[in-house]
Image: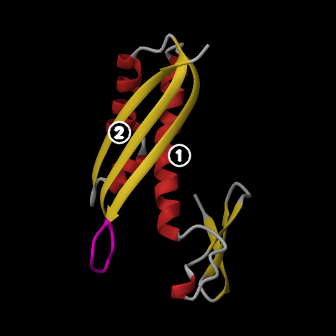
Amino acid sequence: MKVRLKWVEEVSFLAQSESGHAVLMDGPPEGGGRNLGPRPMEMVLMGAAGCSTYDVIHILKKGRADVRDCVVEVEADRAETEPKVFTRIHLHFIVKGRGLKPEQVERAIKLSAEKYCSATIMLAKTAEVTHDFEVLEVD
């Protein structure tokens, strides 16, 4: 896997993925940025949420669950001193579907957390990573 990152100006960077996608990252005005994009550490959390959600949806669909939507709300704390690594990350899954069983969702989240999600498993080396969920029925 490869990415290319180019410094644009001040604390703005354009990152390009090997698959051809790009994202602009920037810092806050107090740090010399213009707030034009997410911070790099926010991107780390977004990536972790995306990785875990990908797994959960894939596992549920593979089990023939009628999953219709999934939102993950992530909250994290960072160390007070450098390096300001994540020390706590909590992922709250809101899974919507028809006839979804909480046990199915719990199992999918557990498999992602313990076996499949490279991002959260890697982040768990410095952070306490926790999960919870709610299942909502849709018509």
Single out the residue that lies furthest toward the top: 99
Q: Name the residue under label 2.
A: 113
> Is residue 4 rendered to the left or right of residue 125?
right
Image x and y of residue 114, in percent: 31, 37
* Vertical arrangement, residue 32 with respect to residue 37, above or below: below
Image x and y of residue 105, in percent: 41, 23
Total of numbered circles in the picture? 2
* Vertical arrangement, residue 114 with respect to residue 57, above or below: below
**Image quadrant in which the C terminus is located:** top right
Q: Mark 1 points at which residue?
A: 50
Identity, as a three-letter code, of the amino acid under mark 2: Ala
Q: What stretch is highlighted in magenta?
A: 78-85
Instruction: Determine the secondary structure under disc 2.
Output: helix
* Front one among 41 and 94: 94
The residue at 53%/38% (across/down) is 71
* Front one among 20 and 9: 9
Decide: few, some or many residues near mark 1? Use Cα within 10 Å; few <14, some 14-19, many ≥20. some
Image x and y of residue 85, in percent: 33, 68
* Vertical arrangement, residue 108 with respect to residue 48, above or below: above
The residue at 46%/50% (across/down) is 48
Looking at the image, what colour scheme do you see? secondary structure
Instruction: Determine the secondary structure under disc 1.
Output: helix
Image x and y of residue 52, in percent: 46, 41
Distance between mark 1 and mark 2 Cα atoms: 13 Å
**Image quadrant in which the N terminus is located:** bottom right
